[in-house]
Amino acid sequence: MSPIVAVVGVGGLGCPAALALAEAGVALRLIDEDSVERSNLHRQVLFTDADVGRRKVEAARDALARIAPGARVEARAEHLVPESAEELLRGVSAIVEGSDNLPTKFLTADAAAGLRVPVVHGACVAWHGTVLPVSWGDGACYRCVFEELPDEEMTNCAIAGVYGPVTSVIGALMAADALRLLRGDRSTAGNLARYDGWRQTFRSTRFPRRSACPLCGDR
């Protein structure tokens, strides 16, 4: 059976990641309940002005069909919630998580752990971006690095803004990590890569698995 990658969040990160994966021949399950807004267009590369008001997953599916004919894309205009997260993600070979809020990031991590599916987390704020690939049993998971959801939302792209070139770079890196995981290469699992688009620098830090982690620790 051909691999299927779930893309959680079809925005600044999910669009370039989905494009790269579709062009590589990977089947996709796009998950996002939002609609395209004009303010999205500078960084969400699959959308045009004609898509404003449409569901993101449907506009992205149609764009991918034009760009990569034959692309297999399932559009799920749904919000990831605890009651349905595992069901929405069931049956995929890997997950690319590019949502713009912390609750969804933690929920995706928890669901991926329950399903034992590798996941690539990505985030961007202003000129900075991060990528964390997770393969269960190989290095740290999301909750090893970010132990718990903070009481108050940290600075995010809605507050600080985000620059389109940075989201494209991070989205492409997420797709590369997903392809690597699909091939069984876990060499970057647990490595938190940090990109500074202003200074054009990369840093990578390998985090060990925490023995007390509620997702992947010793139980």
Image (cartoon, rainbow, N blue to C red):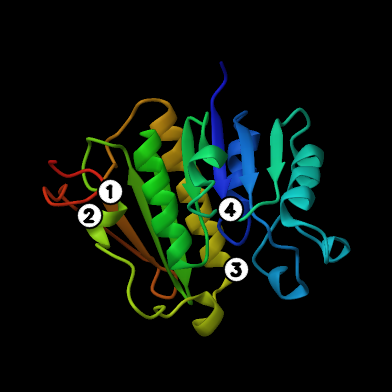
Tell me the residue at 35%/46% (across/down). 133
Query: Few, some or many C-alpha atoms within 10 Å of disc 3 (few <14, some 14-19, many ≥20)?
Result: some
Q: Measured from the top left, where is residue 197 in percent x and y?
A: 44, 70
In the rendered view of the protein, which quadrant contains the N terminus? Answer: top right
Residue denoted by label 4: 14
What's the residue type where badge 3 is placed? Gly
What's the residue type where badge 1 is placed? Cys
State how far apart marks 4 and 1 are (Cα).
20 Å
Label 4 sits on a secondary structure element that is: helix
Residue denoted by label 3: 164
Instruction: State which quadrant residue 177 falls in.
Output: top left
Whether residue 12 is situated above or below residue 175 in the rendered picture: below
State how far apart marks 3 and 1 are (Cα).
27 Å
Tell me the residue at 46%/74% (across/down). 127
Label 2 sits on a secondary structure element that is: helix
Residue denoted by label 1: 141
Whether residue 53 is situated above or below residue 82 in the rendered picture: below
Instruction: State which quadrant residue 61 falls in.
Output: top right
Q: Measured from the top left, where is residue 27 in percent x and y?
A: 62, 30
Instruction: State which quadrant residue 205 falls in.
Output: bottom left
Residue extending furthest toward the front: 83
Q: Nearer the viewer, mark 3 or mark 4?
A: 4
- Labels 1 and 2 touching (C-beta < 8 A): yes
Q: Measured from the top left, where is residue 102 in percent x and y?
A: 43, 66
Whether residue 163 is situated above or below residue 98 in the rendered picture: below
What's the residue type where badge 4 is placed? Gly
Residue denoted by label 2: 144
Which mark, residue 9? none
In depth, the one of 23 and 55 nearer the eye is 55
The answer to whether residue 117 is visible is no
Residue extending furthest toward the bottom: 159
